[in-house]
Image: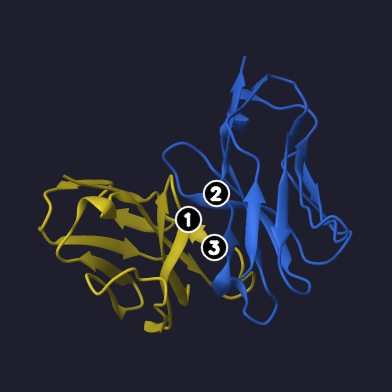
Chain colours: A blue, B yellow
Amino acid sequence: GDSVTQMEGPVTLSEEAFLTINCTYTATGYPSLFWYVQYPGEGLQLLLKATKADDKGSNKGFEATYRKETTSFHLEKGSVQVSDSAVYFCALTQPGTGFQKLVFGTGTRLLVSP
Amino acid sequence: DAGVIQSPRHEVTEMGQEVTLRCKPISGHDYLFWYRQTMMRGLELLIYFNNNVPIDDSGMPEDRFSAKMPNASFSTLKIQPSEPRDSAVYFCASSGPGLREKLFFGSGTQLSVL
């Protein structure tokens, strides 16, 4: 079945450092890809998405590019802030099955220190 | 917009007791999801409803788990009897017309079964 693999955390960075969180997926066809973020004590919220190969999703300074050839959707940010400390989830869904069958990775915790 | 509201935030109970988790989705949303989050298994979809009707409960782990949605503004997830391995964070999420894959999550219920 479909699956998402994320890098182990925590990722520990200093403020203004460059961030990369790796995400690869296994799926048939052309899934839609998402990044969700979970701030401490809160539920997950959609951060960005991409629905076809070479699409770049972006939001709040974060971006990720849908790479079909490497089955990857790595999350990047040029300069992280303390407020970015959270758990980040990569997810996919298959067209046709729709959003009802979102498949999540296990999450990567990001810790940003001043 | 109050968002998805879950109660209680924390629940501590003893093995064998009945546990009821509650969720109020965002008004106007027609899909409601129950997820379970654990360190070992990550985020798992347990069941989802469309227009108050259960559509897919294949993720419900055992007959001890049951979920209902008596109306558009209320859902419950019940565990009877509870076991220590049920300890997890349980999230409710909803989505509505427009951007279906944008799930709105509640803050979760942290369940501890002793």
Give B89 or A15, whichever is nearer the viewer: B89
Instruction: Determine the CA span between mark 3 and mark 1.
Output: 14 Å
Residue B20 locus on image (x, y percent): 20, 62
Taking the spot 43% from the left edge, 71% from the top edge, the residue there is: B32
- Whether residue A91 appears in this view of the structure is no
A26 over A56 or under it: above or below: below
Name the amino acid type tagged 1.
Leu
Instruction: Determine the CA span between mark 1 and mark 2.
Output: 7 Å
Tell me the element at label 1: strand
Name the amino acid type tagged 3.
Leu
Do the residues at pointers 3 and 2 share their chain? no
Do the residues at pointers 3 and 1 share their chain? yes
Single out the mark in the foreground, 3 or 1.
1
Residue B92 location, quadrant: bottom left
Taking the spot 71% from the left edge, 27% from the top edge, the residue there is: A80
**Which one is earlier in the sequence, the residue at label 3 or at label 1?**
1
Circle 3 chain: B
Label pair 1/2, CB-CB below 8 angstroms: yes
A59 over A3 or under it: above or below: above
The residue to which callout 3 is attached is B103
Residue B23 locus on image (x, y percent): 32, 63
> Left or right of A4: which side holds B90?
left
Residue A95 locus on image (x, y percent): 70, 77
Circle 1 chain: B
Residue A83 location, quadrant: top right
Tell me the element at label 2: loop
Tell me the number on the disc at residue B43: 1
Taking the spot 22% from the left edge, 70% from the top edge, the residue there is: B64
Do the residues at pointers 1 and 2 share their chain? no
> Left or right of A1: which side holds B85?
left
The residue to which callout 2 is attached is A106
Circle 2 chain: A
